[in-house]
Image: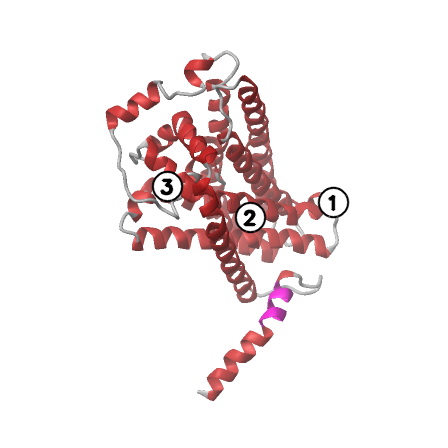
Amino acid sequence: MTDTMTHYSNLLTTLPTKLYSAAFPSPDESPSSQDLMILVSTIAVMWAAIFSVLHRYLHPYAMRQQWLTDAMGREYDRVGLSMCKALRVKWTRQRYTEIMLNDWPKMQGIYLQHFIGGALCLPAVLGYTDSWAANLACLGVLSEMGWEMSDMADIVITRSTAIDGKERVPDTLVMIMSIHHSMTLTLGLPLVMKYRQLRTLHLLTFNLQWAAALAISANEYCKTLDLKNQKQLWTFRIVNGICFGIMAWMRGIYWLFLCGKLHMRLYEDEEYTMMCVGVVIYTLITGFNVMLCIYPFGKKMLKFGPRSKEMGLVDMDDGEELEDTKKEGGVHLSPSNNSLMEKGDTDN
């Protein structure tokens, strides 16, 4: 018993040093997969704790804000009902609003996490070639990996323990999030171990994380705009148009270019296993990017553009989608603190 306690005490004592060495190895060092997994697991716990704190303090605030309640209702009329149909879940307008209010703190945490992960890549993206810049960029990869581990754990726990878990996190959404998380969870660690100094890896990580951060934060802002107000309508159009351009470039054209460049490197180095796994994953992620990142912004550009019937489309309280809700009915369940419905439309 004493030996066991001593062993665990030594582990805790040396843990900070291990974590630092794994995150910031010297140029002649290469962290082991075990040390990197310890670092990733620690990051996963850290992000889980941060999201828990955000929910604890921001959720009561969100529930008191009438402007936020109104915003979530408008979002349901704009795109929420279509999203629910795609996920094969029937939510009433009230139920959707409850879920989005409960998830609002989590959405703030998601784009915060992506902004931080992308920011870690900035020195390498800006051209710094020192080992510290590469280490920071790889920490951005590991940060994303840690968050995705905690998010998948949240999905599993919600579906397996909550009475309405499978309704809150339907099969379609599980598939979408599994595709979204597949790249980092399968290739993140091997790429960091093999290609820590590779600029293409740094650019790819930066692009994926900041594109998601910009899109999610802009989408959260656009929810608050009342499109019956002409000034706010034009703000919506401008922000949405900028996001479409960013997504089309960072999650479309430049994504394909970087994937091709990375695959050429893997082929040259005869890393055929990573290359074959990568082909499957990049194909899935490309589909994800087109359908859930680029297309939604393009659809909103057409739907709420200057040539649309503005009063008939910008706010559909009396429109076609609301009528569909009345005809189809909906499931009204107790509020959820952990629903992931929103990410089916906006996340990376």
Q: Which residue is mark 2?
A: 113
Residue 50, relative to residue 91: is it above or below? Answer: below
Q: Is 324 displayed left or right of 187 in the figure?
A: left
Q: Residue at x 29, y 23 (%)?
A: 324
Within-10-Å neighbours for mark 3: few <14, some 14–19, many 20+: many
Whole-percent x and y of residue 307?
50, 11
- Tell me if I can see residue 287 in this picture: no
Residue 106, relative to residue 38: is it above or below? Answer: above
> Marks 1/3: CA distance?
38 Å
Whole-percent x and y of residue 250?
59, 34
Q: Residue at x 61, y 48 (%)?
A: 116
User: What's the residue type where badge 1 is placed?
Assistant: Gly
Q: Earlier in the sequence, mark 1 or mark 3?
A: 1
Magenta region includes residue 180: no
User: What's the residue type where badge 2 is placed?
Assistant: Gln
Q: Which residue is mark 1?
A: 127
Whole-percent x and y of residue 339?
38, 45
Which region of the structure is painted magenta? 15-22
Q: Which residue is mark 3?
A: 173
Whole-percent x and y of residue 255?
57, 36
Q: Earlier in the sequence, mark 3 or mark 2?
A: 2
Q: Secondary structure at mark 1?
A: loop
- Given contact means CB atoms under 8 Å apart, are the residues at marks 1 and 2 in contact? no
Q: Is 35 displayed left or right of 284 in the figure?
A: right
User: What's the residue type where badge 3 is placed?
Assistant: Leu
> Marks 3/2: CA distance?
21 Å
Which of 153 and 217 lies nearest the eye of the viewer?
Answer: 217
Which of 135 and 117 lies nearest the eye of the viewer?
Answer: 117
Q: Secondary structure at mark 3?
A: helix
Within-10-Å neighbours for mark 2: few <14, some 14–19, many 20+: many
- Tell me if I can see residue 22 in this picture: yes
